[in-house]
Amino acid sequence: MTTVVAGILMLGVLVFVHELGHFVVAKMCGVKVLKFSLGFGPRLFSRRRGETEYQVCVIPLGGYVQMLGEGSGEQGEAGVLTAEERDRSFAEKPVSKRLAIVLAGPLMNLLLPFLILPVSFMAGVQLPTYLEQPACIGYVVPASSAANAGFEAEDCIVAVNGRSVESWSSANKAFVSQAGDSLAFEIIRGGNHLELEIPAENDSLEGMQALGLLPQQSARIGGLAPDMPAAQAGIEEGDLIVRIGDQEITSWYDLKSVIQGVGAHPVSVLIDRAGQELAFELTPVQRDQEGDFLIGIAPLNESETRSYSFPAAVKEGAYRTWELIELTVVFVQKLFTGSVSAKNIGGPITVVQVAGQAAQTDLSAILSVLAFISIQLGILNLLPIPILDGGHILFYTIELIIRRPLSVRAREMAQQVGMAMLLMLMVLAFYNDIVRLWG
């Protein structure tokens, strides 16, 4: 429940920012704003201040700003627009002002990350240490796309489709930007340069792990399950496993095969604890007759927290914002061309879930997720689909070019098509959300 409430509040912030853009620019253009609503459906509460009614409604999945003369033509208080009301009607404003009002909402969502991400970088961002390390492979998942292409542990990636790769972070960015396309990798194996290719079969946006490539990871323990062999033997979090029996352990990925080989037999485990080697004896256990043998340990996800000065935070925040905008545009482009699967589309449930989880961590995570969702909301609303802001922007741009508005019939037909497209998109998004939730 806490996650849901926190997620709804964060989504409400983004909706407020979006509608505030419409509201402020409408006021600047002299348009009378009748209603400012967060949410849809029955009102929870409302208050009138001046000429505008401010309200919060039951369904917290959006909002709207209602302006005099918008849509099918609002009437004045007397039933007919007076001269003063006509002067303040949205429909009577020049097309340039109407365009500015509609454009303001998505632009506010795109500008918000430039303001909040620097705060996140100043507060301190937590980064997995492997992201800045060379893109050397620690493990290749069997039967994965990478395994089929011939990748091996300890291969180091130096380029993807001709794009230079210096770290796991840059490798992930290169992969996401090329998702759905054939991938040509330049790697170094044992001092030799090789080229490997993965066909255009992968349409996930989860980074290199979607191909079956995992970074190098030491066998250092980050978590212990209570009442399991490792904890009972006296092994502690932070211990580095050096040897199990007579098998040397060089990475976390060595552990599973070694433990399965030991089976339900006592074995000596040599660990390094703060530079001191200690030996423990334990016996792996099996959860069920056909399950794996376990000792009850989890890996240490090594990370570091970086805090930036104000100038550096502004620079990093701007760079990260532009990077997110670029990746989102690439995703939308690949989605419409069929290069990535529609399964990657998330709806309100996913948004609330992700936002809610971030809201229970720290300020940096909250602001980062807010920025990410805000960019997606801004770009979604810029799509030239009638009903969305992008559809209205398209109509007003055409009006600027041909110097007259589209016919009422043309707009009505376009809006019907847009509504059908939006409903299909919403159904798909909710379906994906439910599949993820139950999955």
Image (spheres, rainbow, N blue to C red):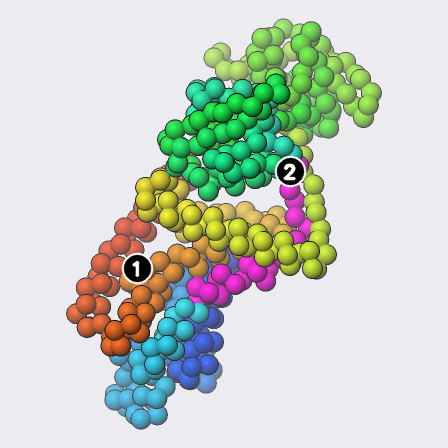
Residue 435 % position (x, y): 37, 38
Q: Secondary structure at mark 1?
A: loop
Q: Is residue 110 magenta?
A: yes
* 121 with respect to 352 (left or right): right
Q: Is residue 434 visible?
A: no
Residue 36 % position (x, y): 42, 73
The residue indicated by pointer 2 is 132
Q: How far apart are the alpha carbons under marks 2 and 1?
A: 40 Å
Q: Is residue 255 visible?
A: yes
Q: Magenta residues?
A: 105-130
Q: Nearer the viewer, residue 162 or 78?
A: 162
The residue indicated by pointer 1 is 385
* 298 with respect to 198 (left or right): right
Q: Principal SS element in the magenta part?
A: helix
* 14 with respect to 426 (left or right): right
Q: Residue furthest bottom?
A: 83
Q: Please name the amino acid that badge 2 sits on.
A: Glu
Give the crowd class for mark 2: few <14, some 14-19, many >=20 residues within 10 Å.
Answer: few
Question: Which residue occupies 49% across, 29% down?
Answer: 185
Residue 195 % position (x, y): 49, 25
